[in-house]
Image (cartoon, coloured by chain):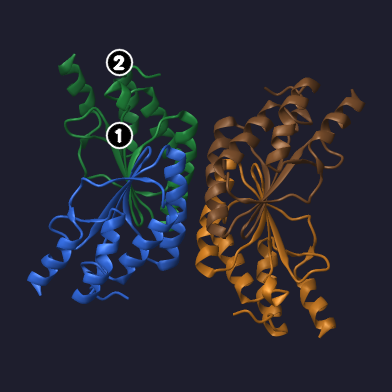
Chain colours: A blue, B brown, C orange, D green
Amino acid sequence: MNELLPEADRKALLPPLAETGWAAVPGEDAIRKIWKFRSFSEAWGFMTRAGLVAEKLNHHPDWTNRYNVVDVTLTTHSAKGLTQLDIDLARAMDRLAPEAEIQRDHGEPVTCLCELHARKA
Amino acid sequence: MNELLPEADRKALLPPLAETGWAAVPGEDAIRKIWKFRSFSEAWGFMTRAGLVAEKLNHHPDWTNRYNVVDVTLTTHSAKGLTQLDIDLARAMDRLAPEAEIQRDHGEPVTCLCELHARKA
Amino acid sequence: MNELLPEADRKALLPPLAETGWAAVPGEDAIRKIWKFRSFSEAWGFMTRAGLVAEKLNHHPDWTNRYNVVDVTLTTHSAKGLTQLDIDLARAMDRLAPEAEIQRDHGEPVTCLCELHARKA
Amino acid sequence: MNELLPEADRKALLPPLAETGWAAVPGEDAIRKIWKFRSFSEAWGFMTRAGLVAEKLNHHPDWTNRYNVVDVTLTTHSAKGLTQLDIDLARAMDRLAPEAEIQRDHGEPVTCLCELHARKA
């Protein structure tokens, strides 16, 4: 589970996440998504349920909360980059808040991660 | 806030709650509703948000959780019966889970509380 | 994990739980413990952390909360009685609230579960 | 509640917070404290209880969680600086985690806020 995602998996798995609002973090092998809920309560309900998933996966997000906003970055520190755990957690978080507003203007498209990684490899 | 609901308020406020699934607790001046969610996670997200409301109102539910089920009884212990606080908390809980399945076969209709109370008065 | 606890395990594992305040539920192969915290907030913090453990174990308590009180019953429904999962969850809950007040007068001592079970076998 | 803290209050109220680990955010009229718990569970229990306080005060922290670390910044956006609400929330958070490890090397001492503000005024 803790191996860096191979290129083929990135090409298959990241674009669908990009469609839901995940984007690459410039300069890092990580993905980020910013949810804008309607209240602290709604944001907190989401975080609580995501926390249950994280604890179950034993893989946790780096996340910031400011009232109704939840800004999430996923990466696997032990692998120094994206692994299947990040894909699983991203998908689970998406399922928990399918109708929330997403702020999309925060980074490069996820697909660029493939290119970034391809250049390194 | 902590005065027993007068009869006129009961007749106006309880029937709409009955429609959403609240029912009288036999022999008590209390209302009860049983939510059946699809998972512990969904039940827990609901309880977490309801907990925020309860703490804000400084009025808390008596509630039982069994995996996906949340069984809530509301009454105001200090007033020995229903007050506006219970109405407010019931409505807030309804707003948090408008689409959840409700188990309705657990008691008498809420409207009977009016009669029960009217007889007492 | 989902097999009923054998007699030898009951004799070894239940008495230490009895010392922390767990007791048998009369007529059922289940254990119960009642925590009395100092506030809803303290009770809720405990339940939140216990919820993380439960979701991780995929084994959940039957529990009731009334302001500062958390009343927990553990059994494994699929096994129709106590299994190792209940022991694990009970121990984890004990670790989360080592200093809370415990209400002990709610049932028979846990040790009777051994005898009860031994008679059945 | 939403007026900027006057100088006299800053001199009285901020130094005790500095002793518990709150420090000024350089260039902003805000305070920050970084808690290092022993696990995600412990961090999350703290955040859950702090969330109850925040919702009750109708004043919420800007906070980041990374596994066991909770990094909190307090300021009152509507007042563009520190108000009594921030003092109240800081004190409440301190009460929730009196024994947690604090990371103190993240900024200037809180006391400098007084001077900073005094120069502006």
The span from disc 1 to disc 2 (Cα, nearest Å) is 17 Å
Quadrant hosting residue C25: bottom right
Q: Left or right of D31: which side holds B4? A: right
Of helix, strand and loop, which one carries label 2?
loop
Q: Earlier in the sequence, mark 1 or mark 2?
A: 2
To which residue does mark 2 refer?
Answer: D6
Q: Is residue B76 visible?
A: no
Query: Which residue shows up at 30% across the image and 29% down it?
Result: D15
Residue type at tag 1: Ala
Quadrant hosting residue D97: top left
Query: Which residue shows up at 22% across the image and 60% down it?
Result: A30
Question: A5 above or below B56?
Answer: below
Nearer to the camera, A47 or A79: A47
Q: Position of residue C95 (x, y in %)?
A: 54, 61
Q: In which quadrant of the rendered image does the C terminus of chain D lie?
A: top left
Question: B4 above or below B111?
Answer: above
Q: Left or right of C95: which side holds B25? A: right
Of helix, strand and loop, which one carries label 1?
helix
Crowd rating for badge 1 (residues with CA inside 10 Å; few <14, some 14–19, many 20+): some
To which residue does mark 1 refer?
Answer: D18
Crowd rating for badge 2 (residues with CA inside 10 Å; few <14, some 14–19, many 20+): some
Q: Position of residue A1 (x, y in %)?
A: 32, 76
Query: Which residue shows up at 25% across the image and 71% down it?
Result: A12
